[in-house]
Image: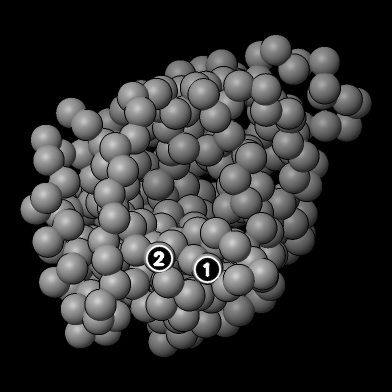
Amino acid sequence: MPTYRLFITTDEAGASTALDVLGTAFEDEGHAVATTEIDEDAGIWQASVYVEAESPDEMEAAISHHLADVLPGLEVETEELPEIDWVTHSLEGLKPVRAGRFIVHGSHDKDAVRIGDIGILIDAAQAFGTGHHGTTAGCLEMLDSVIRGWPAASGYPSPILDLGTGSGVLAIAAAKITPASVLATDIDPIATRVALENMKINKVGNQVRAITAAGFHSPEIANAAPFELIVANILARPLMKMAPEISNALAPGGSVILSGILAEQRWKVLAAFNAQGMAHVRTIWRNGWVTIHLR
């Protein structure tokens, strides 16, 4: 089925407004919504919705309807995207990524792992999380920092929940630096399969369980709770919605690492978790994205 990008061209404020409106409007449909700076000097931005459909006409009308009141008069443009395996294509030629003690690399870059490094082997696959995105790298750096600073009495957090595991890279990282029991979950069964394969490759399969689950609606998550550490690299909106569930699943004195959050969304996420009685500890900023540690 063809994939289309439907977009408007506006300024930064307009793009931010469109992101909020369209993100809410299409949240249940699962369509990706994103903003991009086109020309920094001229202040030109685009807000885009990506959709798989036989025709883009219905989505074009829906976008126009949702933006009519807040951004009147803007034309919705459409482009059909080429059929490319974007995951494999995007990983071609990528260099190993260092974050904290970790180095995430492909099988062709094993020589990049030096003495003292904690290597994580992740090759191209249909799941998010290679370390190259600011959110994944930020989570790896924060995970290393949080576990290094864990109270000496307990030594390390256990159990650990990796919510929205993708490639499994964060669950693998946790298992590489602690003997903790780790539960990795994802809503996408393909991601779960990929994560299981990566865990086996990285020799942590006996320590990490990977399951397909939608949020906290899983008896396996309920049975494993409470967690001393929860890592969730998803998106700001679902994180804010799940703030009460994350808080309820956290053990007393536990920590939460959150990412998938644009810098301008940081205060909204903090407000949602502050409302659950959680306090901000540290924020890492990477390429327009933030990773937040709360407890």
Residue tagged 2: 9
Does residue 248 appear in the picture of this structure?
no
Q: Residue at x 66, y 69 (%)?
A: 41
Is the residue 218 above or below the residue 48 in the image?
above
* Residue at disc 2, secondary structure: strand
Q: Quadrant of residue 102?
A: top right
Q: Earlier in the sequence, mark 1 or mark 2?
A: 2
Residue type at numbered disc 2 = Thr
Residue tagged 1: 44
Residue 130: image location, x then y, percent: 58, 34
Alpha carbons under labels 1 and 2: distance apart: 7 Å
Viewer-nearest residue: 263 or 137: 263
Horizontal side of residue 27 vs 244, given as left or right: left
Q: Residue at x 16, y 46 (%)?
A: 56
Question: Is the C-beta separation of discs 1 and 2 under 8 Å?
Answer: yes
Is the residue 264 above or below the residue 105 in the image?
below
Q: Quadrant of the C terminus?
A: bottom right
Residue 81: image location, x then y, percent: 34, 35
Residue type at numbered disc 1 = Ile
Q: Quadrant of the N terminus?
A: top left
Does residue 66 appear in the picture of this structure?
yes
Q: Residue at x 71, y 52 (%)?
A: 141
Viewer-nearest residue: 133 or 6: 6
Horizontal side of residue 166 vs 263, given as left or right: left
Give the crowd class for mark 1: few <14, some 14-19, many >=20 residues within 10 Å.
some
